[in-house]
Amino acid sequence: MSFTAFYRNDYVGETINSLVDSKTISYFVKPRNNVFMPSNVDSAIVLGNGLTRNYADNKFLLKINANKVPQAYKLVYACNRAVHEEENYDYYILRHNVFLANVKKERFPQIYLPNNIFLNNIERCNLIPMISHLDAGSSAVMLAAFDGHKKIFMMGFDGSLGNGWQTVYDDTFPYNQNNSEVSLAHWKDYMTMVLTAYSDTEFYRIRYDGQQAPDEWRALPNFKDVSMREAVLLGDF
């Protein structure tokens, strides 16, 4: 399955449907007019949940970015349980209701949800635009491209690292229930769809431990595995 790239500048809203008591309910979602965008929209950072996300170099780069002036600041998109972390990122893409529990009130306007969860949170959260079935990481990368960033740096998109599916949240609920939201195969395929659709965007995955990205990603001309040093130079951090 594939889709066509779409962008926030052209987004006029969309109609979503839900089945309630055997009846289809339609709701038109208008674009939000309170979305923060810095003057530098060239680059963005997307945080996956892989183990390398917490590597010291990645944390240091995020700290440097957080202290930059608005003209040089890069928006940071994070997934799922990151919404409960002390660090304040710009946008949070959540796939399950469980992650909404005990969220700080001021973070709700920064949250994006798939349409089945959004309908119960219309007044306080945002809808993941157009494509709602992807995993959280692929949705976050798609949202960054949708926002118009032309260089997207991916941290913590590790896959299996050869040791099975592992995340920085494995000891926390619901990750400790051994029911991953998406298989490794789907995770790879969903991301391939995003990279392919946004062919005018450059995607850079920061790689550690010699681990290569899936062959399907590396075959695309707009994707590249890079070292931290290369990422710093490419993104002008």
Image (spheres, rainbow, N blue to C red):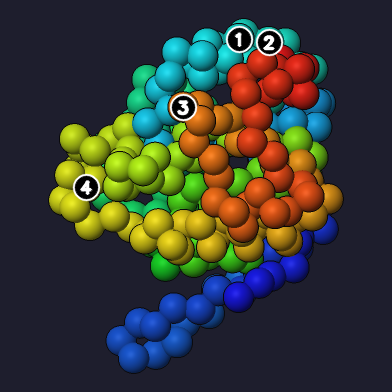
Query: Left of 206 or right of it: where is 34?
Result: right
Mark linked to residue 132: none
Q: Amino acid at mark 2?
A: Lys
Residue bearing the label numbered 1: 64
Q: Amino acid at mark 3?
A: Asp
Q: CA distance from mark 4 to mark 3?
A: 27 Å
In what element is the residue under mark 4?
loop
- Which residue is at the front of the view, 88 or 29? 88
Mark closest to the chain's N terminus, 4 or 1 = 1
Mark linked to residue 174: 4
Query: Left of 169 or right of it: where is 132?
Result: right
Mark closest to the chain's N terminus, 1 or 3 = 1
The structure residue drawn at horizontal position 19% and vertical position 52%, both measured from the top left corner, is 178
- Which residue is at the front of the view, 127 or 152? 152
Mark linked to residue 209: 3
Residue 43 is at least partly visible in this image: yes
Mark closest to the chain's N terminus, 4 or 2 = 2
Residue 49 is at least partly visible in this image: no
The structure residue drawn at horizontal position 19% and vertical position 35%, both measured from the top left corner, is 171
Q: Position of residue 220 (x, y in %)?
A: 73, 53
The structure residue drawn at horizontal position 37% and vertical position 20%, both measured from the top left corner, is 86
Q: CA distance from mark 4 to mark 2?
A: 34 Å
In what element is the residue under mark 3?
loop
Location of residue 148 (image quadrant): top right
In what element is the residue under mark 1?
helix
The answer to whether the residue labelled 2 contacts the one labelled 1, judged by CB atoms less than 8 Å apart, is yes
Q: Amino acid at mark 1?
A: Ile
In what element is the residue under mark 2?
loop
